Image: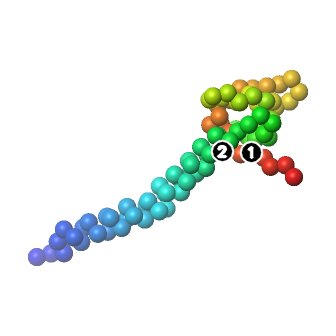
Amino acid sequence: MPGGGIGSFFVPLILIFIIMYFVMIRPQKKRQEQQQKLIGSLKTGDRVVTNAGIHGLISNVKENTVLLKVADNVKIEMDKSAITNVVKES
């Protein structure tokens, strides 16, 4: 009788799933939580960087968007989810 039964098939499959969870799924959830925390803490006057690499100063925060001043007399409205980083000035 070849093989070791049904247990020899499921044990490696379960181990692969556990490894995938700790390598891929868990870090992604942590990044998502950090992004949500960042979006929730945005306020007028913050210097930010968007996912497109645009640097600007938040001039107005709305429910789902922010008004970003990128140059003198140049403001663009962006989704909050486009903000990837708040720049800390020293």
Q: Which of the labelled discs sits on residue 86, or is there none? A: 1
**What x and y, as percent, mark residue 82?**
65, 37
47 over 79 or under it: above or below: below
Say whether residue 51 is visible.
no
Pick the front one: 3 or 56: 56
| Residues at marks 1 and 2 touching, judged by CB atoms closer than 8 Å | yes
Which residue, given by chain and number where applicable, does mark 2 sit on? 38
User: Quadrant of residue 74 in the image?
Assistant: top right
Q: Residue at x 75, y 28 (%)?
A: 60
**Mark nearer the N terminus (1 vs 2):** 2
Q: What is the three-letter code of the residue carrying label 2?
A: Leu
Is the residue 68 above or below the residue 39 in the image? above
Taking the image as shown, residue 62 lies to the left or right of residue 8, namely right
Instruction: Work out which residue is located at the far top of the displayed protein and give it.
Output: 73
The colour scheme used to paint the residues is rainbow
Q: Position of residue 40 (x, y in %)?
A: 64, 40
Q: Is residue 36 left or right of residue 15?
A: right
Q: Which is more toward the observer, 51 or 89?
A: 89
Of residues 13 and 81, which is closer to you in this image? 81
Q: Quadrant of residue 16?
A: bottom left
Residue 83 position by quadrant: top right
Secondary structure beneath dot 2 equals helix
Question: Residue at (67%, 27%) from the top-left corner?
Answer: 62
The location of residue 26, given as percent across then percent down, is 49, 57
Q: Secondary structure at mark 1?
A: strand
